[in-house]
């Protein structure tokens, strides 16, 4: 965790806020802000405010950090205290109104780009392409084609002989 920002006692239900969490979790900071600006939800303005605060905390906490390498590692919407109000109903009764609040927590982390990590990722990509057939060697491809044609010719020859 590089930086953390908390926003408490927001007058929005955590259920409504949890709708936008999957949109930004795991995204880079600039990308997350642009996504939140495009979303037509009331919770998005609080999330943008919180994200900008976390970026400012990261800059202050670690001088010379590259903001383009930061991503949203954790975003949580917890329940805050509920404000209870009453509304008059018919026949002298009252119905309860629950005004929910929430506490938001956002954590930023830095994307690791070590030379060992890049070499490992490149090797894994090569293994994946060879295993799944995107970049097969020529000998293996021609051998498979030859094997697949032989049984078909033999079966065709048997049909004509009978």
Image: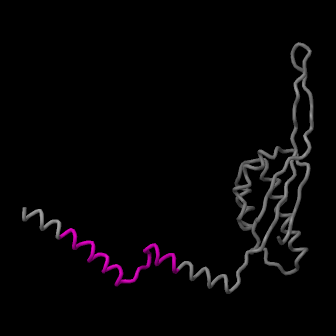
Residue at image position (26%, 77%) is 146
Q: Is residue 138 magenta?
A: yes
**Which residues lie in the magenta part?**
126-153
Residue 135 higher or lower than 100, as above or below: below
Q: Is residue 120 left or right of residue 88?
A: left
**Quadrant of the drawing holding the N terminus:** bottom right
Q: Quadrant of residue 121?
A: bottom right
> Residue 11 at what x, y percent from top left?
87, 45
Q: Quadrant of residue 118?
A: bottom right
Residue at image position (79%, 58%) is 75
Residue at image position (36%, 81%) is 140
Magenta portion: prevailing SS class: helix
Q: Tell me, what colour scheme is on the image?
A: one colour
Q: Is residue 54 magenta?
A: no
> Residue 66 at what x, y percent from top left?
79, 78
- Toward the left, the furthest residue is 161
> Residue 76 at what x, y percent from top left?
80, 55
Q: Nearer the viewer, residue 24 or 80?
A: 80
Q: Quadrant of residue 91?
A: top right
**Quadrant of the drawing holding the C terminus:** bottom left
Q: Is residue 105 left or right of residue 32?
A: right
Q: How many numbered marks have been drawn onto this rendered protein structure?
A: 0
> Residue 85 at what x, y percent from top left?
92, 31
Q: Is residue 113 left or right of residue 13?
A: left
Residue 98 higher or lower than 11, as above or below: above
Residue 141 higher or lower than 159, as above or below: below
Residue at image position (92%, 38%) is 83
């Amino acid at each position: 965790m590089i930086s953390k920002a908390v926003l408490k006692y927001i007058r929005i239900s955590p259920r409504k806020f949890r709708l936008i969490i999957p949109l930004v979790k795991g995204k880079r900071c600039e990308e997350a802000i642009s996504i939140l600006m495009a979303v037509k939800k009331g919770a998005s303005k609080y999330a943008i405010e919180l994200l900008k605060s976390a970026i400012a905390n990261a800059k202050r906490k670690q001088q010379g950090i590259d903001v383009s390498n930061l991503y949203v590692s954790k975003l949580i919407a917890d329940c805050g205290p509920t404000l209870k109000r009453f509304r008059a109903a018919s026949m002298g009764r009252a119905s309860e109104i629950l005004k929910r609040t929430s506490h938001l927590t956002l954590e930023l982390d830095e994307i690791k780009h070590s030379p060992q990590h890049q070499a490992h990722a490149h090797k894994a990509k090569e293994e994946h392409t060879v295993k799944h057939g995107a970049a097969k060697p020529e000998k293996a491809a021609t051998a498979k084609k030859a094997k697949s044609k032989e049984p078909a010719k033999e079966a065709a020859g048997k049909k004509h002989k009978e």
